Image (tube, coloured by chain):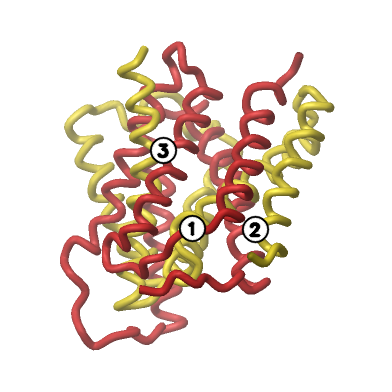
Chain colours: A red, B yellow
């Protein structure tokens, strides 16, 4: 498989960074909802309104299917992993780990499993080997994140 | 404690797993369709959990500010973006850039909303993250 890895174009770069911004807004909105309602409610409502908006988008944009081959059935189950995530994080947030520990360990799990998946080409996605510069970027971004998570709060 | 740490780690693994599975679906369909399935399957799952555990409407959810109800629409775009990106730049690159964007916009939101915080730690954290993005973007091997 290819081990040469093009530098992501500016569009990909900006899209991923912007998606991170959207995630901050989601955390703020859903977290605020959880202050007033139950944790289940704060996960149920965004799934409900999200489903309605997604249907509207599909009806208006009518995106064409990339392949005439049917995807495997398990490919439809990504939403379950997302639902379990909400339950796990709300369970650990209220332990000695607190929010900062929960977020930091979540980042670690995410990055380690992503690297593993890239190296193995899991789930039918392209296989790619990280290069030294990728590890340096990873170390810097994770170090910065840990500084913000553990030291960025009020002194 | 170790058990809870393992659960928090597992939550991160599941975030990545979910993005990969959605990305695989988008390869055969489209990023928007993948986001639709993610939401409707997740809705079924959370509804089932609500039926089993109860307490869905506990508290005073109607007293929340109106904008707290906007997480769903934002999530549709977020999931579509992740599904689209992961097949193009890989799981690790997608995860890292999303984390970078989340961390930096989180500080911006905190500053805008006047949340107290350690200014120096915020500056150092953001500089480290920007340096990491610069390395990942500009350096050639």
Please identify the quadrant where the C terminus of chain A is shown.
top right
Query: For mark 2, what is the residue?
Result: B136
Number of disc labels: 3
Instruction: Name the N-terminal-most of marks 1 and 3.
Output: 3
What chain is tagged by disc 1? A
Residue at mark 2 to residue at mark 1: CA–CA distance: 11 Å
Residue at (24, 88) in percent of width and height: A68
Quick one: A57 or A73, which is closer to the camera?
Answer: A73
Query: For mark 3, what is the residue?
Result: A109
Front disc: 1 or 3 = 1
Q: What element carries label 2?
A: helix
Front disc: 2 or 3 = 2
Q: Where is residue A134 in the image (x, y as percent from the top left)?
A: 57, 54
Residue at mark 2 to residue at mark 3: CA–CA distance: 20 Å
What chain is tagged by disc 2? B
Q: Do labels 2 and 1 share a chain?
A: no
What chain is tagged by disc 3? A
Residue A25 seen in this snapshot:
no
The quadrant where residue B127 appears: top right
Residue at (49, 38) in percent of width and height: A107
Q: Where is residue B108 in the image (x, y as percent from the top left)?
A: 76, 42
Query: For mark 1, what is the residue?
Result: A130
State left or right for residue A85 relative to residue A16: left
The quadrant where residue B39 appears: bottom left
User: Badge 2, how many Cα within 10 Å: few under 14, some, many 20+?
Assistant: many
Above or below — where is A129 with respect to A137?
A: below
Residue at (52, 30) in percent of width and height: A104
Residue at mark 1 to residue at mark 3: CA–CA distance: 17 Å
Above or below — where is A71 with respect to B49?
A: below
Q: Is mark 1 on a helix, strand or loop?
A: loop
């Amino acid at each position: 498989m290819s081990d040469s890895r093009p530098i992501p174009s500016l569009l990909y770069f900006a899209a991923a960074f912007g998606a991170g911004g959207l995630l901050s807004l989601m955390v703020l909105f859903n977290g605020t909802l959880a202050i007033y309602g139950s944790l289940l409610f704060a996960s149920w409502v965004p799934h409900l309104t999200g489903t309605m908006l997604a249907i509207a988008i599909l009806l208006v944009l009518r995106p064409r299917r990339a392949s005439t081959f049917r995807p495997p059935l398990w490919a439809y189950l990504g939403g379950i992993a997302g639902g379990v995530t909400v339950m796990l994080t709300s369970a650990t947030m209220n332990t000695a780990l607190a929010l900062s520990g929960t977020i930091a360990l979540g980042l670690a799990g995410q990055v380690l499993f992503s690297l593993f998946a890239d190296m193995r080409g899991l789930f039918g996605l392209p296989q790619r080997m990280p290069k030294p510069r990728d590890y340096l970027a990873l170390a810097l971004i994770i170090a910065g994140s840990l500084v913000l998570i553990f030291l960025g709060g009020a002194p | 404690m170790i058990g809870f740490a393992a659960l928090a780690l597992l939550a991160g693994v599941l975030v990545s797993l979910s993005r990969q599975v959605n990305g695989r679906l988008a390869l055969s369909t489209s990023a928007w369709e993948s986001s639709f399935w993610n939401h409707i399957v997740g809705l079924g799952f959370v509804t089932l959990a609500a039926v089993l555990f109860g307490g869905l409407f506990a508290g005073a959810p109607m007293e929340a500010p109106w904008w707290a109800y906007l997480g769903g629409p934002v999530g549709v775009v977020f999931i579509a973006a992740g599904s689209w990106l992961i097949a193009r730049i890989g799981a690790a690159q997608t995860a890292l850039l999303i984390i970078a964007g989340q961390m930096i916009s989180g500080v911006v939101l905190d500053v805008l909303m006047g949340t107290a915080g350690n200014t120096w730690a915020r500056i150092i954290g953001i500089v480290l993250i920007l340096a990491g993005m610069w390395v990942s973007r500009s350096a050639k091997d």
